[in-house]
Amino acid sequence: MQKVSLIMMVALLIAGTASGAEFGKERPVAIVTGSEQEQPAIDGHIVAWSDNRSGNYDIFMYDLETGLEKWVCINPFFQLNPAVSSERIVWQDMRSGNGDVYIYDVVNRTESAITVAPGNQTQPDISGDRVVWSDDRDGIYKIHLYDLRTKNEQILPSGEGEEIEPKIDGDRVVWMDKRAGDFDVYMYDISSGKELALATGPADQSFPSIHGNIVAWADNRTGDPDIAFFDLTTQKTTTLTKPGKQTDPKVYGEYIAYLNNGTEIYLHDIEADADFAPAPGYIKMEPAISSRGVVWTDYREGSRDPDIYMYDFKILADVSITSGPFNHTNPAISKDKIVWTDNRNGHFNVYLFDITTQKEVNITNDSFDHSSPDISGDNVIWTDKSRGNLNIFLYNLSTEKTVQVTTDASDHRYGMIDGNNIIWIDRRSGSEQIYLYDIATGRERQITTQESLKLSPVINADKIVWIDSRSGEDKWDVYLYNLTSGEETAICTNSARQAQPWVWGDTVVWADGRNKNWDIYSYDLVNKVEKPLVTNAANQGSPMIYKNYVAWLDVRGGDSDVYLYDLRKSVEVPVATLPLQQTPNDGKGDPDQVKPHLSSKIISDNKIVWMDNSNGYAQIKMRYILSDPLLLLNTDFPSTNESLLVWSDNRGGYWNIYGFDFFTRSEKPISRGDWDELYPKVSGDKVVWSDYRNGDSDIYMKDLTTGVESVVASGTGDQIWPSISGDRVVWMDNSSGNWDIYLSDVARSGAEPVYKGPGQQMYPIISGDLVVWQDNRNGNWDVYVKDLKSGNETKLTGEGDQVYPDVSGSTIVWEDGKSSDISYYLWDKKWGKTYPRPGNQTSPVAFGKYIAYVDGSADDTSIRKLDISNWKDELVQSGPGQVKPSMDKKLVWLNAMTGRPRSVSVTAGQTSVICKAPGDQSHPSVGGNDLVG
């Protein structure tokens, strides 16, 4: 019953690719046009930086696991030099007029001062519970150390000179020391209390960095700075001698990131003794490194508009489809086949690459140009002038035969294929019209009749979209034609211009100019709802939609890049952001301007392709869409008690336990590890779950008051599906060879069977003295209850399968498999009833007089709530994809479409903390827009 971890999912996605898998990809962290993002720091999943989008420098952070950016400290004065360790961020803060050191706890969302002493406290660094900084309160800069656990501050023992740029890792602190006249590198071991000179050569040894047993610094003894590092294990110093200037080293594990000649970021692999540039091109400065990757300040948008970028070690690398000094242009993809044109033989010909076989096929090999190929299944089309005018040709991969599709004397542009249908625009009638050719029947027909200019037709199944100038020559609107109904519909006629539409299923997307720049909009054909998808201040264009994915061209980073949006999860991710142009198409391989204003078919299944111009020649690249962890984020098994919601999610690669407090409106990790943790349940301040850290499943518990995590049940086989009420925990246990129900009172110790016998006993739930479960000892699934107070066991159900029980107080509910309805039993009244309702009702949960359940089947499921005192039934959330309810004071459930939990109050009224800051807060008032002051 263990779920597949995110790490395993990525491996499965790339299984079978002949070229294997490589990891590492450049991606933006923070791009804010017209402002400066600088001084990045990284540890684990958190990137922090100094940001002046507000007019002064503040501290911001980005969570690499969730894809969320947050402000850490926004203050009228400057906040600078952030450093990160796990879930804590420290920085230099100028709010008092001189430098102080502040800290932010990401989990508890609290800010506090580490030191506000006289003088300046600058250049802070943090490792675990220890913070170091350079401090001139006594007239000269010295290194201070503060222990967050003991609250003790100390000055590190040292010589007489100035000490700056401290860095800490565990028990070791390194810094620049001027006791000998020039700067040298010294280290202090906190555990032993000993100081050690690491580098005392001629000239300056500066900007040290430490991780583990490696200390690196910039060494200027030869005149130009080189990177040197000292291995504390071997006591050996190694200098990396290279031409030019190498400075600003940062160490993590076996890697040293450094600045080369003031403009490039390089990585040195200590074990391999090799260097490489993870992201060449443009000016890069201020590297920082952690287990997740390298971050830097990036100047691709100019010296006054730096942004934060990173090279992510844990994201699958792009796959190169083409190579060589030729222009490979205008790709299109269908399942595992990619087509494009390139000019390797002097003219643009059509080529195909099969991802499964890893083989390239030359479709055409002529001494004239071919433009804008497209593919659907085994059929490939392109346009060329071999007959004097622009005609569309069809090539079948199975028969290896070419057929001329268009035969009249006009030019045929915007050819596109989908299934058996090929569409295009021509002017044979005197005005631009859309035509369709049916491959199966060999027949052609005219689709449009309106005399107007038309551009960018796209077909998917029985729908064709295009832009149309019937409202005026400089006014373009989006129209749709349905091949099944024969109806034409205006999709968007906003007074601004619309461009480059695309359709998939019941969704149309296009580029829209209503906001004075180009944005991406969508229209739902079923619900007749229009909404903006991307409204970044930069231009977005050339959208394409495939299933729930929308990709487009985006210039927020200066050059054109490719971005992608998941409509179900409402998540946006960068696809290609390398230097220079990353585009769906560029027209270079379209010498006759066959598709000058059209998007490209760049997505199919789990793959996206594009043109990469970062190395001088346009190359075709591909990546697996779901290799981005943000698109694989999912939440499961939500459960609630009192004000706490708990769930399992895979943001760290494995399924771990998280919680959200409805009262304080804060989220916290409850248990994290490099193993899966599933099926959480909560009661009061105790959370239990199934834990796979030892290979099979055991039951673990965390006391949220004490923070202590403990084992409730372990042993042979699996112990899974725990439920807790007060100090009692029940679970399923298959140590006997079949599933039995066990119970433990965690206030005491030991475990005892609730029922151990023939058949399978599964999915136990406990509330007070009652334990319920489903049981097939008699052949069918029945619901049993045991009263722990009396010790009596009772079978509640009769014929047919009765499954997935729940209990709250005296109310017991379950699914009636025979009638597909919800049944309930009131234990205190010894009376039960089935609630008849059309359709399927599943997953019932109880709280007080209420029963919540899932209504519907397959993906079309909603959440409803029944008041059993009056049989009033209300819709809580309509579908699709609303599943797995849990109920206490809140009703929570999972939106399976977005992978996120949802919640509402079971009864009216809710109290929330508005402000919980230090000091007194008084005289509150409330105004419009839910504002409290």
Image (cartoon, helix red, strand yellow):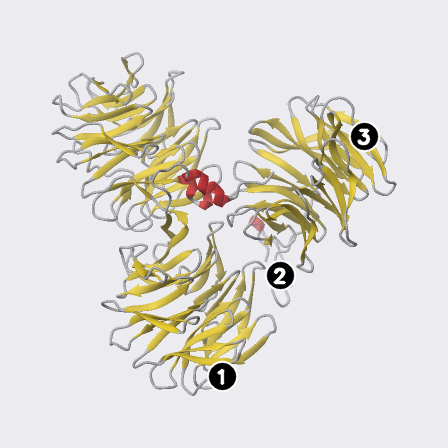
Give the amino acid at mark 2.
Answer: Lys
* Residue that carries the numbered disc 1 in the rendered image: 157
* Residue that carries the numbered disc 2 in the rendered image: 916
Q: Is residue 792 above or below residue 230?
A: above
Locate the C terminus by quadrant. bottom right
Numbered label attached to residue 930: none
The span from disc 3 to disc 2 (Cα, nearest Å) is 50 Å
143 with respect to 436 (left or right):
right
The span from disc 3 to disc 1 (Cα, nearest Å) is 74 Å
Name the spot of residue 339 as percent of width and height, x first: 27, 31
User: Secondary structure beneath disc 2?
Assistant: loop
- The residue depicted at 28 percent of the width and 66 percent of the height is 262
* Residue that carries the numbered disc 3 in the rendered image: 795
User: Secondary structure beneath disc 3?
Assistant: strand
- The residue depicted at 37 percent of the width and 52 percent of the height is 28
The span from disc 1 to disc 2 (Cα, nearest Å) is 39 Å
Q: Which of marks 2 and 1 precedes in the sequence?
A: 1
- The residue depicted at 51 percent of the width and 61 percent of the height is 86
Give the amino acid at mark 1.
Answer: Pro
Whether residue 585 is visible to the viewer of this picture, yes or no, is: yes
